[in-house]
Amino acid sequence: MTFRDLNLNTPIYNALDDLGFETPTPIQKEAFNVVASGRDMVGIAQTGTGKTFAYMLPILRHLKYSRQDNPRVLVIVPTRELVVQVAEEIEKLSRYINNRVLGVYGGTNINTQKQAVAQGLDIIVATPGRLYDLAMSRVLQLKSIQKLVIDEVDVMLDLGFKHQLMNIFDILPERRQNIMFSATMTKDVDSLIQGFFITPQKIQIAVSGTPLENINQQRYNVPNFYTKVNLLQDLLKIRDLHSKVLIFVGYKSMADLLYEKLEEFFPGECCVIHSNKTQNYRLKSIEQFSVGAHRMLVATDVMARGLDIDDISHVINFDTPEYPENYMHRIGRTGRAEKEGHAILLSTEKEQEARKRIESLMQFKIPLAEIPEYIEISTELIDEERPKQKERHNPIKRTSNGKEGQSIHEKKAKNKKVNLGGSYKREIAKKYKKPKTRGDKSSNKRKNRRK
Ligand code: AMP
């Protein structure tokens, strides 16, 4: 299949020819018709798969020439680097199309960007914070947005941009197409999709369930976090075997805690990356691990995604990933270039279901190793492992389906009231009829004067 088999047009074909691109990548093939159809879409794809063109090709194909100044396509990305990169990709594809593309991000002079916005545009690429500030200043009008693309949603949520995104959703027109890309599936991503997308079509380039042949896999059943730490400290004592160890954990606080515990035992041999660390700190950690100055790197899935590091001797799954694809991504970091790699999976009782899902994706049972007898089994629990306290006195009882249950007594009249906002405003609105716009207001006044 070539790009000629997709329903593109001459300006786009010419741009693709200039770039020397002939064949669409798998995600481009899969996404084209879905994006073109106008349906909401969720694509699971990593950087480097051609995902930017996957959404831009169909969008540009159907974006008509317009003289209006307000942008019609909004692309939100988590970092300024990505703003620049995505805007460049769009420019490349738009070489023979008469459209206006602008990238905006924080940390730079907002006034320059306001001036650029005021010139009029078709496509805006932005980080969430700066986008919101521009919209609030009223220079940027988002009322004409027809297509919303959110790229690298997993990183965005991991960086804590959820509320910023919600605020932006609030000021966008309701009738719009939502397109979202994420490299990893996480619970946060899933809940965003459930909350804001309308029966989205999911597109996923199947992650190979066949691990590289030269990865030796092993697993341990371990009751809790601190026992996992004890086992890990014991394994990592054998330094020449565990020469470059990438340790995955599910979330930031666990990454910090584990890093602390490993540092106690192996001072100066360990580093950590997650989204609360500054970019400088992350780059330094990765560099030190990469050149072998540090033997161990603790990382969360989202942050470890773009890592390209050679000669990793072991990938340790300190927790068992919920989504089996994440396990495949994790262990794929070792055993490359025909070297033998090792992958170790640690699972608590609660994590057994996730472990089974991984095994069924691979159609392979990971051999179980016994914890050596001398490893201390800890009884100390971290917050997440403690049983949740039930609220004994909360009057709002929840039923098993999570909804508020019926109260036994009839509510008193004053408690039955529904909160409609301030009474003064309502009275005034009733009296003078609520103005819909400022224009209305003055016409109301005029009418009143005439009376
Ligand atoms: P992305 O995953 O969007 O970051 O794209 C990765 C790189 O692949 C970019 O430099 C694109 O210009 C390039 N690329 C995108 N689509 C194609 C294609 N069909 N053939 C060759 N290269 C491509």
Image (cartoon, rainbow, N blue to C red):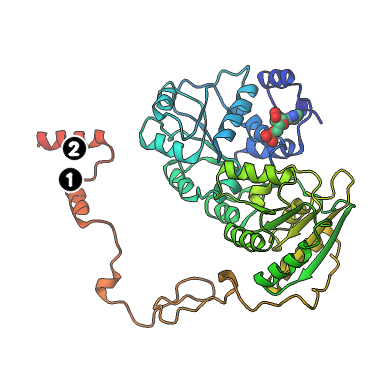
Where residue 159 appears, as percent x and y from the top left, is 54, 48
| Residue 39 screen position, x and y as percent | 60, 42
Which is more toward the observer, 273 or 129? 273
Q: Amino acid at mark 2?
A: Asn
- View extreme (front): residue: 267
SS class, disc 1: helix
Task: Classify the position of the N terminus by image quarter.
Answer: top right
Report the front residue among 118 and 73: 118
Label 1, ligand 1: CB separation under 8 Å: no
- The answer to whether one can see residue 347 in this image is yes
Q: Is 136 drawn above or below residue 329 in the view shown?
A: above
Is 50 drawn above or below residue 261 in the view shown?
above
Image position, residue 409 (x, y; %) = 34, 82
The quarter in which the C terminus is drawn is top left
Q: Secondary structure at mark 2?
A: helix
Residue at the image point whose x is 44% and y is 35% from the top:
142
Which numbered dot is residue 444?
A: 2
Residue lying at 21% horizontally and 57% vertically, measured from the top left? 423
For badge 1, the amino acid type reads Tyr
Q: Position of residue 446 (x, y in %)?
A: 15, 33
Q: Which mark is residue 432?
A: 1
The reply to whether the residue tagged 2 has its Cβ within 8 angstroms of ligand 1 is no
Q: Decide: marks 2, 1 in contact (CB < 8 A)?
A: yes
Q: Is residue 354 above or below residue 435?
A: below
